[in-house]
Image: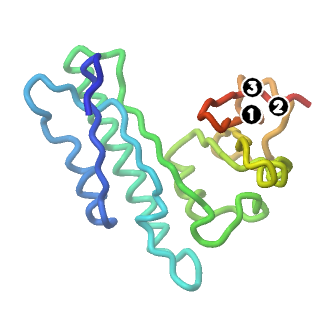
């Protein structure tokens, strides 16, 4: 898909962990003549490439999460170097990884124990965006079938306290609210104390 500014987007849907690793490892291959290397790599649903056993997350799941994360970051560093060589120093290749901790039966409100996969992923990616449905609004939403209300929190590695409504750290640890209206419009607001 290309937009009017010539930005090219490619969507890939690897069917297995092995295919995913191959796709990421091949991102470094020379793009077609004149084409710029990717400046954004998004991995949606990382949990689909892990194989939870009946006993929960196993060592192989942790190893796979670490392998995927390390390969993504290594590839992004290489692509950033290629962008700089092309004179596109203002660009760097960024990585976004989406992971749903409910894949193994946990609920989004279950923060009492650390998710073993997120613990691994956090070591590689310094910033986390946690998105959870605002439970206080859920009964109203279900009854009215109107908008969806979500809570969003940005945090850094090692943050063990929940997001709050009072922070001075430029939004880190600050609780935000996202309202998705029926018409698709989205409204963001800071949750005040």
- For the question of whether residue 150 can be seen, the reply is no
What residue sits 21% from the left and 26% below the top? 36
The answer to whether 16 is drawn above or below residue 178 in the figure is below
Q: Nearer the viewer, mark 3 or mark 2?
A: 2
Residue 186 percent across, percent down from the top left: 64, 30
The residue under the point 33% across, 44% down is 74
Where is residue 43 shown, x and y percent of the image? 41, 49
Quickly name the residue at label 2: 191
Residue 133 or 193: which is nearer the viewer?
133
The colour style of the image is rainbow
Q: 98 or 183: nearer the eye?
A: 183
Q: How many marks?
A: 3
How packed mark 2 is, by other alpha carbons closer than 10 Å (few <14, some 14-19, many 20 or more), is some
Crowd around label 1: few <14 · some 14–19 · many ≥20 (10 Å): many
Distance from Cα at disc 3 to Cα at disc 1: 14 Å
Closer to the chain start, of discs 3 and 1, is 3
Q: Where does the C terminus fall, quadrant-wise?
A: top right
Q: Are marks 3 and 2 in contact (CB under 8 Å)?
A: no
Image: 181 above or below 112: above
Seen as rendered, the residue at the extreme left is 33
Image marks 2 and 1: residues in contact by CB distance under 8 Å: yes
Task: Give the residue pinned by disc 1.
Answer: 176
Q: Is residue 66 visible?
A: yes
Q: Which residue is mark 3?
A: 169
Which quadrant holds the N terminus? top left
């Amino acid at each position: 898909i290309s937009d009017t500014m010539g930005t090219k987007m490619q969507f890939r849907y690897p069917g297995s962990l092995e295919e995913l690793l191959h796709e990421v490892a091949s991102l470094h291959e020379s793009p077609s003549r004149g084409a710029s290397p990717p400046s954004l790599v998004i991995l949606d649903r990382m949990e689909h490439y892990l194989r939870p056993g009946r006993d929960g997350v196993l060592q192989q799941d942790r190893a796979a999460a670490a392998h995927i994360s390390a390969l993504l970051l290594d590839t992004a560093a290489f692509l950033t170097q290629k962008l700089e060589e092309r004179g596109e120093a203002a660009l760097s290749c960024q990585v976004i990884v989406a992971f749903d901790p409910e894949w193994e039966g946990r609920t989004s409100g279950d923060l009492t124990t650390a998710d073993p996969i997120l613990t691994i992923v956090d070591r590689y990616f310094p910033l986390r965006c946690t998105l959870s449905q605002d439970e206080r609004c859920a009964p109203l939403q279900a009854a009215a079938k109107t908008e969806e209300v979500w809570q969003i929190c940005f945090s850094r590695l090692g943050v063990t306290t929940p997001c709050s409504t009072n922070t001075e750290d430029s939004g880190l640890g600050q609780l935000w609210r996202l309202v998705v209206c029926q018409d698709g419009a989205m409204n963001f607001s800071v949750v005040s104390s």
